[in-house]
Amino acid sequence: MIRYIAGVPLFLLLLLSPLAECRQITDDFLRLPSDRSSILDHAFPHMNDVDDDPIGTRWAVLIAGSNGYWNYRHQADVCHAYQVLKKGGLKDENIIVFMYDDIAYHEENPRPGIIINSPHGSDVYTGVPKDYTGEHVTVNNFFAALLGDKAAITGGSGKVVDSGPNDHIFLYYSDHGGAGVLGMPTVPFLYADGLINTLKKKHASGTYKSMVIYVEACESGSIFEGLLPEGLNIYATTASNAVESSWGAYCPGDYPSPPPEYDTCLGDLYSAAWMEDSEIHNLRTETLKRQYELVKMRTANGGSYYGSHVLQFGDKELSKEKLYMYMGTNPANDNFTFVDDNSLRPMSSKAVNQRDADLVHFWEKFRKAPEGSQEKMEAQTRFVEAMSHRVHLDHSIKLVGKLLFGMGKGPEVLHTVRPAGQPLVDDWSCLRTLVKTFEMHCGSLSQYGMKHMRSIANICNAGIRADQMAEASAQACPSVPSGPWSSLHRGFSA
């Protein structure tokens, strides 16, 4: 006579138990609900309600570091990343989203309540958690959330990475950047040393098994160059090296271009590359290294001027792991077999320098507006203000260099690039101090002015004190500009 335990034949339990033991032997095994055998799903439907994964949880932190409709692409990137992870099986409770959230219902958005990340893409805004929006998208909240420090959070949902020692963390950032810094929609900037110190604290807490970081920003290689040590179980890739821009994609005038009603870039080249790759491949079999190589090739854009050099940092041994460990995988791609012929092609696009995407937007607004209209006048004003701000910053930094080091040596000091493997600056406190000193006299660096961060770092490395910087900045800028890009309105970047 067959004996039953909780309605299940005893001999069937005995038959299945060795299989269960084998599945728990491999430390690297990580499964989603979709991983379970269909036989078990049908035979024991009650087991689907139990989170019996002994290895750990996938966590994700997604950050769009900008605001303003001209920066549409950054929030579109982050919303798209959320959809990729959601389809991969990650739960909302384990995905933390930072974005200003001023794009979907912006008056300039031709499709209110909808955000797209490519010309023919579907809405990526639906369902995205609003964890930290508006003025709550701050460096401090990001660090606290990553560290799992709920007490340090100000505003927002209060959600944090409450991870354990067997968990895996995916961190994705998209915005403007400069040497040693990443932008935020609030002040201050996210400085590289602050990020690295936070990653070290997270590692010291023993609350993750491994972490993968993707960074979309100009000069993003400088965030990790000479700073991210091996041994933290962290693998990072960046959209560009330490001295070049990253690129917007799906921009007006390019091919493929946005729908005609859009006058802004929909995405970014590196971000589109990794997300569109993730959407068509079986992430159970594709490794981080394989995606890195594909993204590197696509972001280089055929070796043209309109591309950047994707780099990798940290514990590169982790690149042998499957993407599935961090992003899950869409069950629809489970039968996908990768061959070179079905990988994504390089974009046949000029792309747009990240730092020029706002000008493209303002120009498109001006070009499309009816002659003599108020809309055309406003678009012209915004374009002129942005250009004037750029000219002012470029001139001011150049003049500060000449005042400090002389007419001949000034440009040489400002344009110095340290050898690969060395961090941007020796004293990060000095860098923050000199940035703030410059902004007090000459106005906010803003998203464009980040291009001058290396120059200010070089001034630090040359031993210039804060009082010397203040004197030179005061001479270069007799008064603080009062335009919309001024530090009078935006605060200080340091």
Image (spheres, rainbow, N blue to C red):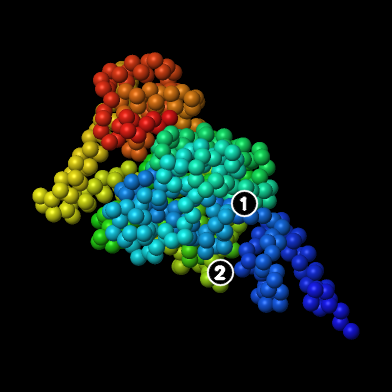
Residue 282's x, y, as percent? Answer: 54, 66
Residue 20's x, y, as percent? Answer: 76, 67
Location of residue 44 with respect to 227 vertically, above or below: below
On the image, numbered disc 1 is attached to which residue? 168
Residue at 71%, 74% in the rendered image: 44
Residue at 55%, 46% in the rendered image: 158
Q: Residue 272's image quarter?
A: bottom left
Residue at 24%, 47% in the rendered image: 362
Question: Which amino acid is tagged 2?
Answer: Pro
Residue 64's x, y, as percent? Answer: 43, 47
Residue 283: which numbered mark, if any? none
Q: Residue furthest left?
A: 372
Residue 331: which numbered mark, if any? 2
Location of residue 331 with respect to 397 vertically, above or below: below
Q: CA distance from mark 2 to mark 1?
A: 20 Å
Q: Residues within 10 Å of mark 2 (few under 14, many from 20)?
A: some
Do the residues bearing badges 2 and 1 touch, measured as CB atoms within 8 Å?
A: no
Quarter occupied by the N terminus: bottom right
SS assignment at label 1: strand
Residue at 32%, 33% in the rendered image: 489
Quarter occupied by the C terminus: top left
Question: Which amino acid is tagged 1?
Answer: His
Location of residue 112 with respect to 96 vertically, above or below: below
Q: Residues within 10 Å of mark 1 (few under 14, many from 20)?
A: many
Residue 387's x, y, as percent? Answer: 23, 38
Q: Residue furthest bottom?
A: 1
Location of residue 344 with respect to 448 vertically, above or below: below
Q: Residue furthest right?
A: 1
